[in-house]
Image (spheres, rainbow, N blue to C red):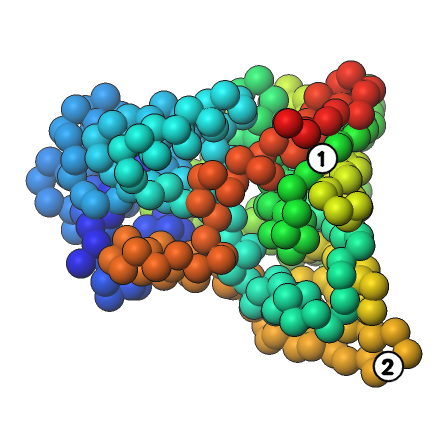
Amino acid sequence: MIKVAVIGFGNRGRIYASQFDKNDRAEVVAVCEKKPRLLDAAKSRYNLKEGMAFASEDDFFAAGKLADALVVASQDRDHYGHAIKGLQNGYHLLLEKPVSPVLSECEEIAALAKEKNLKVVVCHVLRYSPFYNKIKEVIDSGAIGEVVSINDTENVGYWHFSHSYVRGNWRKESETAPSILAKCCHDLDLIYYLGGKKCEKVSSYGSRRVFLPENAPEGATDYCLAPCPHSKECVYHVRKIYYGFTRYTVPKLIVNGKLITEKGKFTIRELKEALKTSPYGRCVYKCDNDVMENQVVSMQLEGGLNASLMMTAFSKRCYRKIYVSGTKGEIIGNDIDGKFKVNIFGGPVKTVRVGISGVLGHLGGDMMIVKDFVDYLITGKKTPKLSLIETTLESHRMAFAAEESRKSGKTISLKG
């Protein structure tokens, strides 16, 4: 039985803890969370023993090794410190992405894990989704020949971007990470995983043009529930995103009520009340955000394989589109439909169906990465889908190079 501790019991920490709890070879035995209500929810949910629930990270790490593995699901800029202390205490790590917004810190975590012979798996969960897993199988089968280009579009969703990257925890680069790393290291990892080649050159450009103070409608209030006179026409009004139905919208992010109210269980009245003062209740044009809303990354990989990534905040739905071009055929699809097409040049067109995995967390990846992580700790078996820390460095370097290119206007070489 693998014993698991969790530091950071927010959205991602709760999800991973839940998946470990469902695994009959693992159990959650300790949680560290600085928000009292979330910590109380963890204590109740996992029936934690006395002294195994921590409000202070210092107390948690001072307690020594409490489990076999540690899930690091804290904020981006806390990952480094928590990972290093976890390794020093002898924990294997399941580390939420991004590893760190600083490349040297990523490399230090990798070096310490190697020195202590500890396993570190990074949560690039899309590798585990049936959709991308099947695409990888088709590529590896040779059906489309040698891959010559990969084009990926990350449609963040206007409601998701406003929640996480305008109002929420990932809105400021200085406090978390650039959006191309925080949101799209998944995509860069997929390009590396599907193509099987290291990146040699990167160029990138991005923009901010909507979520700016000068775009606020006249008379707009600082908080949506002030009330704001533009509540009916504004698509970003909190009622439409968090709790109320309209003719054309459903409250997709009502699930974030736990985060906003800081309660394990909440009522709509409590959610409304919290939104009057919560950062998530602010007008999207009057926040302190500074991360890119749109960004394009162009990459040259080994062997002349070209790749591109487009990240945009402005889409109705939250999904990815992918186009893989090979010397004998092509793959075209999006991960929300549960299917993709394989077009063989001079041959048949085949539709590959992978089911309705889109309704599950990260297309089913959250569940499967926990399963493989537990198996890895018990048996030592590594599947190609496991994104180990040394593998993760490749895609993270692509993200750091993209930001360097965007800011400098130069093409960045990753050779050598």
Please tell me which of labels 1 and 2 falls first in the chain: 1
Please give the name of the residue rendered at 58% of the width and 34% of the height, measured from the top-left corner.
396
Q: Residue 310 at what x, y percent from top left?
A: 77, 43
Residue 325 in the figure: left or right of residue 371: right
Badge 2, how many Cα within 10 Å: few under 14, some, many 20+?
Answer: few
In the rendered image, residue 362, in percent from the top left (x then y), is placed at: 54, 56
Say left or right for 186 vs 249: left
Classify the position of the C terminus by image quarter. Answer: top right
Question: The disc labelled 2 sits on which kind of residue?
Answer: Gly
Rendering coords of residue 343 (x, y %): 82, 73
Taking 218 as reference, is 339 above or below it?
Answer: below
Choose between 396 and 66: the one closer to the eye: 396
In the picture, the disc for residue 257 is: none
Vertical order, 161 against 223 (above or below)? below
The local secondary structure at tag 1 comes to strand
Along the viewing direction, whichever of 146 and 150 lies nearer the viewer = 146
The quadrant of the picture occupied by the N terminus is bottom left
Q: CA distance from mark 1 to mark 2?
A: 33 Å
Where on the picture, by quarter, is residue 383?
bottom left
Q: How many marks?
A: 2
The part of the image, by quadrant, that contains residue 183 is: top right
Q: Residue at x 71, y 21 (%)?
A: 404
In this rendering, would 295 be left or right of 259? right
Q: Residue at x 48, y 33 (%)?
A: 99
Q: Residue at x 80, y 25 (%)?
A: 411
Amino acid on which disc 1 is placed:
Glu
User: Percent from the top left, x then y, of residue 399?
Assistant: 65, 32
- Kindly indicate the quadrant of the structure image that contains residue 54: top left
Above or below 143: residue 39: above
The residue that label 2 is drawn on is 347
- The residue pinned by badge 1 equals 200
Q: Is residue 153 visible?
A: no
